[in-house]
Image: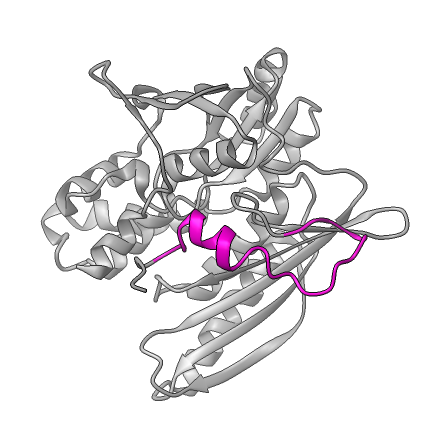
Amino acid sequence: MGLPIGKIPKELLEKYVLKFTGKASRNVVQGPKFGIDFAVIKLDDEYMVVSSDPVTGAEKEVGWYAVNVSANDVATSGSKPMYLESVILLPQESKAEDVISISKQIHRAAKTLGISIIGGHTELTPRLERKIVITTAFGFTKRYVTAANAKENDAILMTKTAGIEGTSILANVFKEKLSKLGDKVIMEASRMIRRISVVKEAVRAFDTGFVHAMHDATEGGVLGGIYEMSVASNLGFLIHEKAIPIAPETRLICKALKIDPLKLISSGVLLLAVDPSGVDLVHSELRKIGVRVSRIGYFKKGKRIFVKKDGSESVIKESVMDELWKLYSE
């Protein structure tokens, strides 16, 4: 069976992966489910929220990416990630400097987020073509939300700009191909890696009491993230292309590479389903910490509708393949 690069399609996940969960436990209150990126385990008087994620598409700053993507998933529950384990897999020809560099990146990212590194595994792997770093982050909380808790008529908000992570990766991987855009554009695009954490904004928004669901827009970008939230919540949506902000560097790079920025991996973009009565408060609280917020649509019953800039509508019927993987597969 041939599969596309990137995330396994929803239908195959549900049929062949998500139902195989080992021994049943009453303490697992949120297990594997499409569109939800963390598990929740009931303890005596609180919950443990835990998430694992790999970074496979980045070469530069792979350790920094790895810490942030798992920490982001935990944060979308509304709780702060506290601890982390890492698995570092390196090609056989790697040097000691590679291990040192990645370890320092993981340390720096974890320290920035206030996360303690408690263990993991590191090895040289035969026939491995690129560096792979996998992290598991977890924390403890009294209450939480998941991406499956969106409600009908909830406003859909997003932070920052589409394609943050992908823009940074592409600026490094396709540096020569993008050289015509100029050094300034490439440099600013590369620096977007510093915007990929959503921990602070997720916790701040959750504390308002008006957030019903959150999701980190990773593979599939903004469109993929909203689709996953809607499937998990058994809802449709209506979103407007003209309301989704795109940074100039992202727009230029995507135009040069002929890809869609709304389908580009977007770690750093927090998607929120917010009670309409609390939208202004969420905006206000996130602006206080310097985070840009945009209202791009709402959840509803029925179809998943994307309104293009020209006013025409399309229906999103399946998982969105990330543009980064399209480029790699080509």
Quarter that holds the C terminus: bottom left
Question: Does the image show residue 302?
Answer: yes
Residue drawn where x is 66% and y is 31% of the image: 206
Give the x, y percent position of residue 198. Answer: 54, 42
In the image, residue 58 sits, relative to residue 32, either above or below, namely below
Give the x, y percent position of residue 143. Answer: 77, 38
Taking depth in this image into account, of 313 and 122 the one nearest to the observer is: 313
Residue drawn where x is 31% and y is 23% of the image: 241
Q: Farthest left residue?
A: 180
Residue 310 is drawn in which quadrant? top left
The secondary structure that most of the magenta stretch takes on is loop
In the image, residue 174 sits, relative to residue 258, either above or below, namely below
Residue drawn where x is 49% and y is 66% of the image: 105
In the image, residue 127 sits, relative to residue 209, either above or below, namely below
Taking depth in this image into account, of 207 and 107 the one nearest to the observer is: 207
Residue 90 among those drawn in magenta? no
In the image, residue 185 sits, relative to residue 201, either above or below, namely below
Quarter that holds the N terminus: bottom left
Left or right: 87, with 255 as reference point: right
Question: Does the image show residue 64?
Answer: no
Taking depth in this image into account, of 200 and 151 the one nearest to the observer is: 151
Give the x, y percent position of residue 114. Answer: 66, 54
Left or right: 141, with 175 as reference point: right
Magenta stretch, residue numbers: 6-31
Left or right: 98, with 151 as reference point: left
Residue 29 among those drawn in magenta? yes
Give the x, y percent position of residue 171. Answer: 25, 53
Residue 304 is drawn in which quadrant? top left
